Amino acid sequence: MISNRLSQALSKQITSEFTASQQYLGIAVYFAQQSLDGWADFFYRQSEEEREHGLKIVRFLVDVEADFELEPLGKATPQFTSPVEAVRAALSWERQVTGQFHEMAEMALAEKDYTTFQFLQWYLDEQVEEEATMQKLIDLIESGVNLFLAEGNLPS
């Protein structure tokens, strides 16, 4: 059975994942308001993916019969000063989430909760991909390429 401490950490992570979904939605709106529809679609998909990540944790906690709460979500903004600022914000958020998953993995190992540790491995792998993708987008924007033309180079 999962400890209360680890259950609470995962419960907070649900909030982080759903808030990340909101944040990506804000970035999508930012790009959509500039008629950069391909960029907007990419971030709409990111928003959906973060929601799925949160739901995966919900299902895990239900399956292991943990007690947990669903907390209110943080707000998100579609206001950024530039496309690179929007994507840098996403990279910063992803790095923060990576740290949160590292802490939970350390907690699971310390408690010898190998089931939860194994569950968290998927997220740790996912975070490598998320951070790399955001860095590649920053590199693309900073290359000076026309963002309308760059839409064909966005990850699918």
Image (spheres, helix red, strand yellow):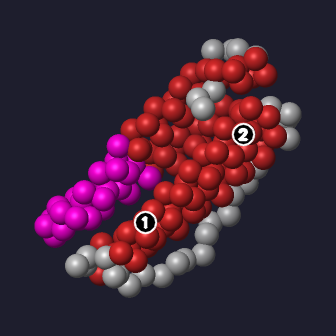
Quadrant in the rendering for residue 139: top right
Instruction: Specify the segment rendered in magenta.
Output: 97-125
> Observer-nearest residue: 48 or 141?
48
Residue of label 1: 57
Location of residue 5 in the rendering, given as x and y in whole percent from the top left corner: 29, 77
Residue drawn at (64%, 45%), measured in percent from left and top?
45
Mainly helix, strand or loop, the magenta region? helix
Q: Say whether disc 1 or disc 2 marks the residue closer to the N-terminus.
A: 2
Residue 115 seen in the figure: yes
Residue 39: quarter of image: top right
Q: Is residue 73 above or below residue 125?
A: below
Q: Does residue 72 lie above or below 118 as drawn? A: below
Specify whether residue 50 is painted magenta.
no
The x and y percentages for residue 106 are: 22, 59
The residue labelled by disc 2 is 41
* Residue sitting farthest toward the bottom: 67
Residue 116 is a magenta residue = yes
Q: Vertical placement of 75 versus 23: above or below?
A: below
